[in-house]
Amino acid sequence: MESNFNQLKVYQKAQEIFKVSRAIACIISDNKNVMEMGISNNYNYHFAGEIVSDSLRLVPSLAVVHNTSNSSLRLKRANNIRKSANRMLIKCRKLEFNGVKETEFLNLLKSEILQFENLFTDWLNNLHYKKDE
């Protein structure tokens, strides 16, 4: 198992997802912050803000999964990570449905999320195997 958390591919992909989601949110909302997007009457701002919020949850949850030996806590956080990734994909589709013009960026984000899900599954399976030895 890799000892340096920030060197993990799944961690780096989570960081990339945050960067891309924040860039998309800035473009869609004319550089509003997440709080402003959350209280806006514009649905696209709302969805973009929620994507950023979900992406922001990935790294701390990965850290908990990585550092805990409690299997029930690991499983709970792993499920939360999967839910966050799924919510981001759903919000991307909602933005597309609402006619957001930045579809190439949304496609990039969806691709990053799908790659993350694959990396996460592989990493989690390996982590469970290593911690259970």
Image: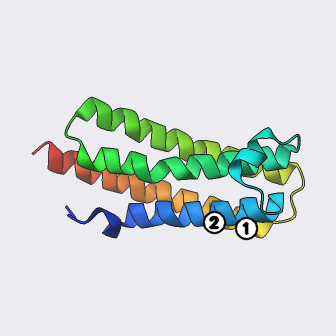
- Residue 50 seen by the camera: yes
Q: Quadrant of the C terminus?
A: top left
Give the percent coordinates (x, y) of residue 97.
85, 49
Question: What label does residue 105 carry, if any?
Answer: 1
Question: What label does residue 20 carry, if any?
Answer: 2
Q: How is the image coloured?
A: rainbow
Task: Please give the name of the residue rendered at 68% of the width and 45% of the height, measured from the top-left corner.
Answer: 50
Task: Please give the name of the residue rendered at 50% of the width and 47% of the height, measured from the top-left corner.
Answer: 57
- Image position of 12 (left or right of 51): left
* Amino acid found under the numbered disc labelled 2: Val
Give the percent coordinates (x, y) of residue 37.
77, 47
Give the percent coordinates (x, y) of residue 120.
40, 54
Vertical order, 104 against 59 (above or below): below
Q: Nearer the viewer, residue 48 or 94?
A: 48
**Residue sitting at the far top:** 72
- Residue 94 seen by the camera: no
- Image position of 12 (left or right of 52): left
Give me the C-alpha separation between circle 1 and circle 2: 8 Å
Vertical order, 9 against 75 (above or below): below
Task: Please give the name of the residue rendered at 78% of the width and 62% of the height, measured from the top-left corner.
Answer: 31
Question: What label does residue 127 carry, if any?
Answer: none
Please tell me whether mark 1 sits on a helix, a strand or a loop: helix
Vertical order, 28 against 98 (above or below): below
Assess disc 1: are there few (<14), some (14-19) or many (≥20) residues with their C-alpha within 10 Å of its C-alpha: some
- Image position of 45 (left or right of 116): right
Task: Please give the name of the residue rendered at 19% of the width and 61% of the height, measured from the top-left corner.
Answer: 1
* Amino acid found under the numbered disc labelled 1: Phe
Q: Quadrant of residue 69?
A: top left
Q: Nearer the viewer, residue 129 or 4?
A: 4
Q: Nearer the viewer, residue 35 or 54?
A: 35
Q: Are marks 1 and 2 in contact (CB under 8 Å)?
A: yes
Please tell me whether mark 2 sits on a helix, a strand or a loop: helix
